[in-house]
Structures are given as C-alpha cells and as structure tokens.
Image (cartoon, grey):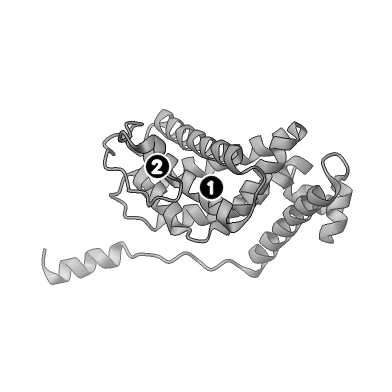
Amino acid sequence: MTQTSSQEATAESPTLAEPAPSRRELNKAATRSSIASAALDLLRSNGSGNFTVEDIAASAGVSRRTFFNYFPSLEAALASVADGFMDHALEQFRLRPADESILESAQAALMALADPMSVAPMAELFSLTQDNRSLARSELEAWEHCTEQIIDAARGRLGTGISELYLHALAGSVISCGKAAMTVWFAERGPDLSAESLAVLRQHLIDAMGLLGAGFAPPSDAVSTPATASPSVPTTTDRF
C-alpha cells in the first residue's frame, strides 16, 4: 500500500474518542449515585425492613417519583451499589488488547484495580445479604446486572456475530467464579471490610479468573497458594 492510500484508509476509519458526558448525564448519574448511597446508609443504620422508599428519597433529597424514575424497587437501589466496581473493571477490560483472550483481559482488569477499597461496596452488600436473607433479591439483582454488563463487554470485543450461547455461558462462568471468590472470602473474613480483608477478596477474584482461564487445571500447589500470592495470567486460553 502506498503512503497516499494508507493515509486515505486511516482517514476512512478514524479512531473516535468517547464523547464527553453532557451536564444532564452527569446530573443523572449523580442523582442515581446519591439514591443508592442513601439506601445503603439506611440499611447500615436501620437494618433490613426498617426503612422505606420514602425514607431513601428523603435522605437523598429527591421525591418518591424521582426515586422510581431511577429504580423500580428498594432492592434495586441497594443492588446498584455494586455498579461502580463493575464500571471500573469493565473500563480496564476495554483498555486491554483486542487480540487478548477474554479471560486474560478480565484477570488483568481486576489486577489493574490496585486499590482494594474499590471492591468495598460490592463486598458490603454481599456481607449484609449473608446475614439477612430477606435481602437476597438485592444480591441477585446485582449479579444479574453484572452478567448483562459482561455480556455486552464480550460482545463488543468479539463482534455481533458471536453465539449468544457462548456469551451467556461465558458471563455465567465469570459470575459463578465471582460468587465463589466472595463466598470463600466471607467464610474466611466474615463482614470485615478493612483494606487488608478487601485485598484478600480482590486477590480471590483475580485467582478465580485465573482458574477459569486455565480450564480448572491448576498446578498441584494451587490449593495451598495463599491469597496474597502474585497471580500469573493463565496461558490456557484456546477456548476463551
């Protein structure tokens, strides 16, 4: 290809930057975050079943109608506290090379979230729902939303022609590994949300992605590998 034709090809397919969010979009995001934070604050202070949608709206400084413009239920508002973690993880995922396997990218994205406190909202929601199963719907909604986001991110990487069965099986496997990491962490640490404890949870999430990427064929010492060990990105990636 000549220099001229190369320049023409570049001009025909420019790399477009993401448009900056409008003020209206930023305000909506801030309102949504404020409602979710108010719901979690009331759960901490009042306990399950001791506050209403009206209480959340009042605490967030919005009307009841505004609450329902953003969330269909109290449980959905609580579930949304996990959105920030997924948003940050998916942002890192989309920065990974396009020719890298999905699961290598997922593990690398988690490793890029160096601050263990980034997982705190999701960890707290999980902790609260373990002690009170009446909140199980909130946890379920959070996982379902994460599944949808993973499917969208994988479709964006692999293209619209990819099998829906593949996308849903992949997302379901990733979510199951996430649940396993959370379950093991909670069994080990309980409702401890210190930075040290959350670092353990972050490492469990990274290691779970590594196990999935390696086809669950870990080395013989994997069972005794401490949670603080540095993970290695799996090389068995022919399926993912």
165 lies above or below 48? above
Q: What residue appears at the point 71 percent right and 38 percent down from the top-left corner?
A: 129
Residue pictured at 33% horizontal, 65% vertical: 14
Residue 201 picture location, percent across and down = 53, 47
Packing grade of label 2 (10 A; few <14, some 14-19, many >=20) is few
Q: Can residue 60 be seen in this view?
A: yes
Above or below: residue 50 compared with residue 98: above
Instruction: Determine whether, in the image, residue 56 is placed left or right of residue 90.
Output: right
Total marks in image: 2
Residue at position x 42%, y 43% in the image: 207
Dot 2 corresponds to which residue?
225
Q: How far apart are marks 2 and 1 (CA)?
A: 14 Å
Q: Position of residue 8 (x, y in %)?
A: 22, 67
**Callout 2 secondary element:** loop
Identify the residue shown where x is 42% and y is 28%: 165
Q: Which mark is residue 48?
A: none
Q: Which of marks 2 and 1 is in front?
A: 2
* Dot 1 alpha-carbon crowd within 10 angstroms: few under 14, some 14 to 19, many 20 or more: many
Can see residue 212? no
Q: Identity of the amino acid at label 1?
A: Leu
Q: What element carries label 1?
A: helix
Quarter of the image with the N terminus in it: bottom left
Sequence order check, earlier mark of 2 and 1: 1
Relative to residue 6, is residue 145 drawn left or right? right
**Residue ID for mark 1:** 201
Residue 182 rendering spot, x and y as whole percentages: 56, 40
| Amino acid type, label 2 | Thr
